[in-house]
Amino acid sequence: MSASYEVRGNVAVITLDNPPVNGLGYDTRRGITDGLARALADAAVAAVVITGAGKAFSGGADIREFGSPKALAEPNLLSVIKALEASTKPVVAAINGVCMGGGLELALGCHYRVAASGVAVALPEVKIGLIPGAGGTQRLPRVIGVEHALNMIVSGEPVKSELLAAIPGQTLFERVVDADVVGVAVALAEEMAAHHAGGAALPLVRNLKASHPNADAYFQFARNTVRAMAKNFPAPAKCVDAVESALKRRFDDGMAYEREIFTALMFTPECKALRHAFLGERAASKIPDVPADTPVRNIAKVAVIGAGTMGGGISMNFLNAGIPVMLLEMKQDALDRGVATIRKNYESRVKKGKLKQEKYDKTMALLSTTLSYDDIQDADLVIEAVFEEMGVKEKVFKALDEVMKPGAILASNTSTLDVDQIAAFTKRPQDVVGMHFFSPANVMKLLEVVRGAKTANDVLATVMKLAKTIRKTAVVSGVCDGFIGNRMIEQYSRQAGFLLEEGCTPQQVDKAVEKFGFAMGPFRMGDLAGNDIGWAIRKRRYQEKPGLRYSKTADLLCELGRFGQKTGAGWYDYVPGKRDAVPSELVVKMIADHRKELGITPRKISDDEIVHRLVYSLVNEGARILEDGIASKASDIDMVYLTGYGFPLWRGGPMCYADTQGLFNVVQAMNRFAANPHDDASFWQPAPLLSKLVAEGRPLI
Ligand code: NAI
């Protein structure tokens, strides 16, 4: 049973005990109802206290039960709450720590609530595309008022217990205390047992009335605001409907309405995508052949080699987490430039009021610089971010091998080079790993952790743990050209090129992709990142594979020196000082001329075809990445795209999207694309994994 029972004086104390956050899984729910039944049957018990073991009261549903029959097995949470409400002995919730989702709904079913101060209280269901499903939308407005409740429900954000207790007229918390919340709850339970002994009815939140002085206008306003802010997510607008019914319907009808909405949302593709992303984030940190209890190395000091674009951003991640960083460069002026950029970044945050001066000073004090390898030898982790040339990497890694203390982790931020080859420059390849950050490295969530053939398990485990400390979503990738993300984006870019040749303008492609939900279409993205980067990759790639078909349009653009925003012109024109992409007549003509040279008669291509060719090119390459064992699960690929490439969250990533479309349909579309003479038929051969899944009628995830 994941809850314990003890009697203190005449009060039974039920303690939820299901680490890490006392999730309300089947055993915990049973623990509550069994404990309650025991308390009710015991004449020596006059009242009940429910609390949580460890740091949480309850974090809500047990995510390990998601999708299993156990999640709904009786007693489900609604039945547990009904049992609490029906108790003839007072039930007091002693909210000792985190109180979220079902945990808060459980507390709202108790007769009284006492909370410790500083407790994070939330109904976060909206973040996985749902609304609270066990009375949260009906009970919370009755105790803290409609507006406060709706704000919490629609944002899913936690609010501290003492702030909630300060809401005028609130009946959520009887008391908020700084210490011994269980002791205070037990005392209150005794007091209430005496108070109600004469037969006075126990207070139930359901009997309170939710009201608002200007309800219709308020809900109209809320609806408009929410629709504008969350247009691709159905749940937030439904939060408004549910809370409105707390005010306008009888309690039981409101509960039925909440359930109806909850069930309908559960089957939406957006909810599926959000739950997939939520679980995918957690799954990414688990590596199939690296046991969870693998010991990790202590990382107290970090060194970064190269103070350029990436080195500076990478350093900031560690400084932000309070970990000292030493930056190493070849020349003093490069160091000075690097440090100045870091300062500028922090100072703009100070100016905007997002960072306190004092914190800034403390953070900068953690940064030191050097021109000598001798000064970094005792670092626990060193990350190399020098020029992307094997010769330069070789020099750096040989130097590191000479000086670094035994057990130090040697990481490379290379985006295209072979990590195994880099590891072979050292006599300790087991300590070498890729840490592929994305630009700007202090902002982007994604970190591809590149596992070399010889990378030790404890190195991987350490880097994955460290990623959490610096708030990155880390995904493990095997060694291959481009790793997971860039290997896939290369196919996407090739498709974008073919689309231009066949009749699209850059603007049309970007618009279709942005309408689909990407933060940026491929051509705007190219202009931002610098078209010369792709140019350099293509030169190498098509030398290696001369038979590979690709569109030369992007090369022609680069030959004109149109590298993107940094040169003031790319696929689009740019007005100095502005980032707006202005369609360029010159580029449209350049594409048309090239098309003519190729003898292609332009055709009108639908937005659907644009999107499917681009997204399915990601899916097909993603499937090959799975087959090759570069990614260990489809959800890892989705996490890469959601956190590093601006893939729309509500579509769950390319692999989740393919499942939503139906793999049968995806493969059919690929076969159609393969028949297009202007495309690359060999690329559109569905990856064997996809064909196999279709034959077996199974999804990718
Ligand atoms: P960058 O050119 O801005 O910075 C490189 C820095 O390394 C320069 O300051 C240079 O002085 C320094 N450096 C060169 N050789 C050195 C040596 N032997 N010892 C010490 N310092 C040395 O380059 P960037 O963009 O920061 O890229 C660095 C690495 O990060 C490359 O491997 C690149 O492929 C990778 N990367 C770049 C991304 C980007 O978007 N720029 C994204 C992900 C990875």
Image (tube, helix red, strand yellow):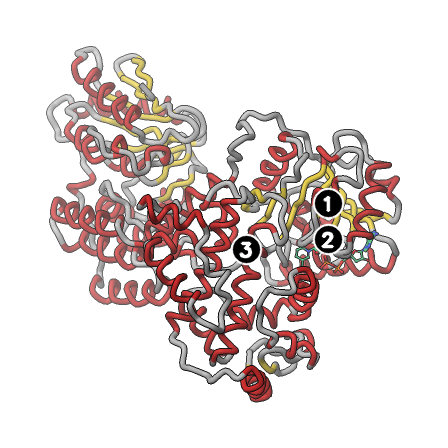
Q: Considering only order in the chain, which callout, 1 or 3, is on the residue closer to the N terminus? A: 1
Which amino acid type is shown beneath numbered disc 3? Gly
CB under 8 Å between callouts 2 and 1?
yes
Which amino acid type is shown beneath numbered disc 2? Gly
Vertical comparison of 601 with 415: above or below? below
Vertical comparison of 496 with 662: above or below? below
Q: Residue at x 36, y 25 (%)?
A: 184
Q: Position of residue 368 (x, y in %)?
A: 80, 47
- Does residue 293 appear in the picture of this structure? yes
Q: Considering only order in the chain, which callout, 3 or 2, is on the residue closer to the N terminus? A: 2
Quarter of the image for the N terminus: give it: top left
Q: Position of residue 646 (x, y in %)?
A: 50, 60
Q: Residue at x 45, y 55 (%)?
A: 619
Tag of residue 383: 1
Mark 2 sits near ligand 1, with its Cβ under 8 Å away: yes
CB under 8 Å between callouts 2 and 3?
no
The answer to which of 608 and 94 lies nearer the viewer is: 608
Badge 2 element: helix
- Does residue 111 appear in the picture of this structure? no
Vertical comparison of 392 with 509: above or below? above
Residue marked by disc 3: 644
Q: Residues within 10 Å of mark 3 (few under 14, many from 20)?
A: some
Residue marked by disc 2: 311
The residues tagged by marks 2 and 3 sit, at their Cα atoms, a distance apart of 18 Å
Q: Considering only order in the chain, which callout, 1 or 2, is on the residue closer to the N terminus? A: 2
